[in-house]
Amino acid sequence: MLLATEEDNFPEPEDGEEPSRSRPCSKVECYPEKYHLGVQRLSLLHDLPPPNATLARTNNVTELIFTGLFQDPEVQRVCFVVFLPVYLATVVGNGLIVLTVSVSKSLQSPMYFFLSYLSLVEISYSSTVVPKFIRDLLAEIKTMSLEGCLAQIFFFHFLGVAEILLLVVMAYDRYVAICKPLHYMNIMSRQVCHLLVAGSWLGGFFHSVIQILVTIQLPFCGPNVIDHYFCDLLPLFKLACTDTFVEGLTVLANSGLISVCSLFILVSSYIVILVNLRKHSAEGRRKALSTCASHIMVVILFFGPAIFLYMRPSSTFTEDKLVAVFYTVITPMLNPIIYTLRNAEVKIAMRRLCSKKDSGMK
């Protein structure tokens, strides 16, 4: 490193080059070209960023390691045996609902149209996390690339918010069906239903884009161990080698605003529905409550774990991971069971579909 100071050892004057005899000259006066060259070098060095700032912008982490749900290999093998059938039941059960609604002429109302899309979202939502999670249960080292982690976060939040908005749409559908039955088919036309579903998908997409744009700006220069079994924003933020207070506040505000507003709309709609049910006959109230009860149970199963995790200080307790297992693995399997067992029309349509398959095979 070359710096220009008054103590620099400048070479002696060459032959024939004499400094002024009137008074001793300084090195600046005797050798102005060499002095200004040193100043230029000092200026260039001054413009360089400090070493820590350069390190902070460096992304050294390319692969992430997960601690997993449990550390004991025996427990992990037991979890594999339990969760693999659960995931297969999720795909088969929700897929059967999608197929039944699409081919059955008796299930062409808006309520079943939204139910089929909810089942499709459940399959996709569970598939962003569970296959990798099940495979890692048998792996000694659980790894994922940083790009794969960001992709998992994107689709996890995209489909999660799409499901929240679909639940809101389904609550609106029940409100119109019970409170405005004479105008139901005019209000909930096929075009309106498609627009509402498209709006829920777009809402999830824009929400997830915001989350990813906030995350990709963070530098990750080590460590690379995530104390979880899948990629999520808050565990990933703990690995960033910079302060993530603002980023954490941004993603929580983004998620919290959608969740709080959606929960408020859901609760308000069902309060209005329950008040209006007093005007119906006993048989009408029974049918309305039967269809609403399934939806309310799904809402509780979805929002309950989310409130437990995100409405309190973050921790690394195993309980947090178990709650995450509930809404990523268990809840998507329960939804088709809830809607099927409590809905006679869906059960009848499934029996007809199965009987057609049996007769076709014969």
Image (spheres, rainbow, N blue to C red):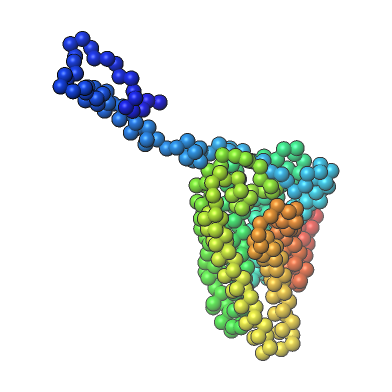
Residue 345 appears in the picture as rendered: no
Rendered position, 71 above or below 293: above
Rendered position, 229 above or below 178: above
Residue sitting at 37 percent across and 36 percent down? 47
Rendered position, 285 above or below 243: below
Residue sitting at 33 percent across and 28 percent down? 5
Rendered position, 282 above or below 176: below
Left or right: 18, with 289 as reference point? left
Residue 97 appears in which quarter of the rendering? Answer: bottom right
Total marks in image: 0
Image location (x, y in percent) of residue 191: 52, 69
Left or right: 313, with 253 as reference point? right
Residue 143 appears in the picture as rendered: yes
Image location (x, y in percent) of residue 15: 21, 9
Which residue of the protein is positioned furthest toward the left in this rendering? Answer: 22
Image location (x, y in percent) of residue 61: 58, 38
Q: Which of 82 and 143 is in front in this view?
A: 143
Q: Which of 328 and 62 is in front in this view?
A: 62
Left or right: 313, with 43 as reference point? right
Left or right: 163, with 40 as reference point? right
Quick one: quadrant of the C terminus? Answer: bottom right
Residue 194 appears in which quarter of the rendering? Answer: bottom right
Quick one: quadrant of the N terminus? Answer: top left
Residue sitting at 65 percent across and 78 percent down? 270
Which residue of the protein is positioned furthest toward the front in this rendering? Answer: 23
Q: Which of 57 and 261 is in front in this view?
A: 57
Residue 32 appears in which quarter of the rendering? Answer: top left
Residue sitting at 69 percent across and 72 percent down? 296
Image location (x, y in percent) of residue 6: 32, 27
